[in-house]
Image (cartoon, rainbow, N blue to C red):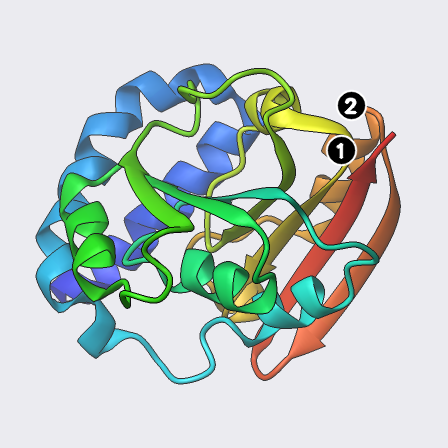
Amino acid sequence: MNTDDLGKRFARVVTNAVVRRPALWRLFRAPLRRQFESLAPGWDARRTPGRIEAYEAALAALSAPPRRALDLGTGTGDGALALARRFPDAEVVGADLAAGMVAEARRKTPPELSGRVRFEVADAARLPFRDGEFDLVAMNNMIPFFDELTRVLAPGGRVVFAFSGGAQTPIYVPPERLRRELSARGFAEFAEFSAGAGTALAAKLR
């Protein structure tokens, strides 16, 4: 098994463990950060075309544009930049655990979006944002921390989870599990999407 396959397998193990028991994140945070720091310089070159198709399909179906949107696990910023282009009046924040990923995202942000998009190094399990700060929290191939994303989402706000390779994505949570976790936290109006090889789920916080 090569290094790339080992990395993907590790990402799946971490995802499954942390979704079941979020307290385990303290054990996995540092090694996962190191993994993505090492990948950051060549990350865009290894990504496949269509990697945010399902993410964009879910965004396109939103009934109202957000004023403030958060792209969690932004990596090199593709999701955050897609949000800014689709919603030209929105302020967008991209957050990622790996400083190297954030540096790449900042580097490739075009000048016309730099006034509305910013990138921050942040741990999704303990975000440096106020309660109810965002109208939309979106993520593509990201481990969800349900309590924390609910905290920073305003009442009536939307959440989007996308997985670029569907169930084959190394970081993947089945829609049944997403629905169960979100329903327990007051979410409703679920919608599922498929585009290319990817899948996505959206919901609204009541």
Residue that badge 2 annotates = 185
Q: Residues within 10 Å of mark 2 (few under 14, many from 20)?
A: some
Q: Is residue 102 left or right of residue 144?
A: left
On screen, 200 above or below 48? above
Q: Position of residue 11 (x, y in %)?
A: 34, 48
**Residue contact at pointers 1 and 2, CB within 8 angstroms:** yes
Question: Which of the numbered marks, if any, corresponds to residue 86?
Answer: none
For the residue pair 33 and 90, the one nearer the viewer reads as 90
Residue at disc 1, secondary structure: helix
Identify which amino acid the numbered label 2 is placed on.
Answer: Arg
Quarter containing the N terminus: bottom left
> What mark, if any, has residue 182 been given in the picture?
1
Name the residue located 64 percent from the left edge and 67 percent from the top edge.
199
Question: Which residue is located at x 79 percent, y 54 percent?
Answer: 64
- 117 shown above or below 32: below
Question: Residue type at mark 1?
Answer: Leu
Q: Position of residue 67 (x, y in %)?
A: 64, 44
Residue 132: give x, y in percent of width and height.
Answer: 65, 22
**In the foreground, 33 or 79:** 79
